[in-house]
Image (tube, rainbow, N blue to C red):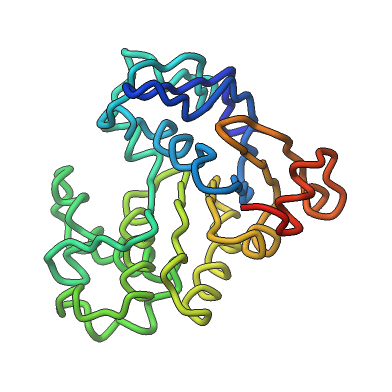
Amino acid sequence: MNKITIEHLTITYSDGVEALSDISLGIPANAISVIFGPAGSGKSSLLRTINRLNDLADVDEVRGRVLIDDQDILSRKIDVIALRRKVGIVFARPVVLPLTIRGNLTYALELAGEKRKERLDEAVERSLSLAALLEEVKDRLDESAFSLSGGQQQRLCLARVLANEPEIILLDEPTSGLDPISTSKVEVSLQELKKSYTILLVPHSVQQAVRTSDFAAFLLQGKLIESAWGKDLFIIPKNKRTEDYVEGRFG
């Protein structure tokens, strides 16, 4: 069952660059779907479109549909703020708020009107646990978030998204700047998180794509080349361009 259905999506920026060209793709629920390809293939544009961050970019034209639970999120009638609560995103570089560790996790909830201490405390513990960070920071919650290491800050950003209880998590190269130990912790967390969330990941390498993916799609120059379940796309790709990229002949 698909959580997200993309139909003939084309994104053109104001400089005339077509970031995505006629993309049609289903993203399954409760799985890790990996979108991979070389730089400039449209991966980030696709993620940004799914939670309407492209609204803030210099986009000239958007054609096609993006359905979440059969609702077209590109419609002008969509409540974009509500959509972004449903679809959280984590970027390559961690951007923590100039608050405490606890404050980073409760800020959005308090802004939405949640004042109950027990509810806020529960959200902090739950989200840190899901992001595999609780044991490392449970005695430091009132310290500045800037006191955390880069890997911890990245997991805090993931926890901040989880605190808002989204249904979909978008991850744009979330481990590209992390050491191998921190990368492993994030990847282990994702395997647990997919039981409750739909995860769409742009990996920082083909190796990470192979390790993490339940479903994978290869983009090249804004076009969908092929997609497949399991490891089939990496082991027996149907398209020569996919094979060449996976085997490191370009990119």
Taking the spot 44% from the left edge, 60% from the top edge, the residue there is 174
**Number of numbered labels in the structure image:** 0
Relative to 102, 86 lies left or right: right
Residue lying farthest to the front in this orientation: 249
Where is residue 125 shown, x and y percent of the image? 34, 69
Is 100 located above or below residue 200 in the figure? below
Taking the spot 64% from the left edge, 58% from the top edge, the residue there is 209
Relative to 157, 241 lies left or right: right
Residue 106 sits in quarter: bottom left
Relative to 112, 88 lies left or right: right
Taking the spot 32% from the left edge, 13% from the top edge, the residue there is 76
Where is residue 188 shown, x and y percent of the image? 57, 70
Taking depth in this image into account, of 240 and 57 the one nearest to the observer is 240
Taking depth in this image into account, of 42 and 77 the one nearest to the observer is 42
Residue 13 sits in quarter: top left
Where is residue 63 shown, x and y percent of the image? 47, 14
Is 108 located above or below residue 205 in the figure? above
Taking the spot 26% from the left edge, 79% from the top edge, the residue there is 148
Taking depth in this image into account, of 240 and 44 the one nearest to the observer is 240
Where is residue 122 shown, x and y percent of the image? 31, 64
Is 2 located above or below residue 75 in the figure? below
Residue 96 sits in quarter: bottom left
**Which quadrant is the N terminus positioned in?**
top right
